[in-house]
Image (spheres, coloured by chain):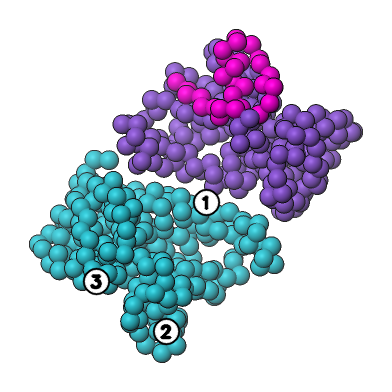
Chain colours: A purple, B cyan
Amino acid sequence: MAAQPAGGQKPQKPFHIVSPVLESLSLSKAAGTKVFMKMENVQPSGSFKIRGIGHLCQDAARRGCRRFVCSSGGNAGLAAALAARELALPITVVVPGSSGPTAVRKLQELGATVEVYGKVWDDANSRAQELAKTEGWVMVPPFDHPLVWEGHASLVRELKDSLEDKPGAIVVAVGGGGLLAGVVAGLQQVGWQDVPIIAAETLGAHSFHEALKAGRLVTLPDITSVATCLGAKTVAARALECARE
Amino acid sequence: MAAQPAGGQKPQKPFHIVSPVLESLSLSKAAGTKVFMKMENVQPSGSFKIRGIGHLCQDAARRGCRRFVCSSGGNAGLAAALAARELALPITVVVPGSSGPTAVRKLQELGATVEVYGKVWDDANSRAQELAKTEGWVMVPPFDHPLVWEGHASLVRELKDSLEDKPGAIVVAVGGGGLLAGVVAGLQQVGWQDVPIIAAETLGAHSFHEALKAGRLVTLPDITSVATCLGAKTVAARALECARE
């Protein structure tokens, strides 16, 4: 795709697709009620992250961004690299050593410059924030930004179009809390603010659980889950606000 | 979903979804040109088969079908079972012994009555054809029927909507040749009849290859591929016609 004119008049098409909603027969059977899955795994970047990160990157490009910086060896990094490619802008992705060669290769295939730094995500994130101080460089936060949540909210608008009835509950996975914040925003947009949210978190990366328990943000000493790149040692402050709302 | 009134006025919604089209970076890299994948794996039945089989079943229901019969332990059987469930009609699926317990369980989860018969698909198919002689019972052919091809053709109409340019070629997998026949029909519908088709077949189930070589339909002595439920010992006559066209 060719570079988009910065500050152009035409609103750009989002980089995410309207994803399918499928009933899972085995989950329905296990839960004793209809369970639908929003198939975010077929997004162009492989995850829902392209919704929010794509939205943020499009906004940054319109404001004259010259290079993106991101700090994720996981789905956020892939989404940022894809968005940068679509916008024909360069990107540096700083990944923690825990990310492994496959993550690095995938990012490079998307045209990203990859720098390996530190052990877990929070280390790589500090380094990326340093880089992002360069004039014209824009930090792509993996989860903690209102534009990211605004982009993720599109997921709920699509659900409203797909489902015949209002769901009894929505289950979301929590890493840094960006999806949760986006789903809460989306529910408010479509008038579904009374739909309960069940937040599920990985043991060993349970910064949201600890924050809820303590009533304030808690930073975990380490990510001990095998899903190292899915966890953040501290959840977004907005996630805690969402739980209170 | 409630039963649809047989012969009702309102055209029924298809059972398939508009599936995403994604570029595969690794395939693009390997091929040296952009390779897109039509993500038929996220169809409600798990494969493209629901397009053609759903179309055929909806047609049969309108004509007063009381029970479906199908002969597939693979994706065609799952599609038929799903279509029957959506239409609130019973279905008997005859599967060959090669299908294994997982296939049987999946079919049963969709509400199908499952009968295990014979070794490979052609055995089960003969038995299903016997059953289908019952008054009001309708045979769901896994691939060899014009309504199935008509349903599969929707895939190409969606491609035309998704892709910016006419593709340089389309790669299709051939088992019985139903997808191939549907893609050919679809290409004609959208005015893309000059797009070359690359048909790929599994070694050990290569009834299309043998038919092309011989210039007439050839019945393989056996399916020797591990993908037993993907193969047909004889390809559809229409597939051979497609190759000639």
Residue visible at 63% across and 46% down in the picture: A45
Task: Identify the disc placed on residue B20.
Answer: 1
Percent x, y of residue B59: 25, 58
Task: Identify the disc placed on residue B123.
Answer: 3
Classify B204 as above or below A179.
below
Front residue of A14/B117: it is B117
Looking at the rendered image, the disc whose residue lies closer to the viewer, 2 or 1, is 2
Looking at the rendered image, the disc whose residue lies closer to the viewer, 3 or 1, is 3
The answer to whether residue B182 is visible is no
Classify B4 as above or below B139.
above
Q: Which of the 4 quarters of the picture holds residue A55?
A: top right
Q: Which of the 4 quarters of the picture holds residue B132?
A: bottom left
Comes first in the chain, label 2 or label 1: 1
**What amino acid is at disc 2?**
Glu
Q: Do discs 3 and 2 share a chain?
A: yes
Q: Mark 2 lies on which chain?
A: B
The answer to whether residue A205 is visible is yes
Mark 3 vs 2: CB contact within 8 A: no
Q: Which residue is disc 2 drawn over? A: B210
Report, in whole angstroms, how far the alpha carbon at label 3 lies from the one at label 2: 21 Å
Quadrant where the C terminus of chain B sits is bottom left
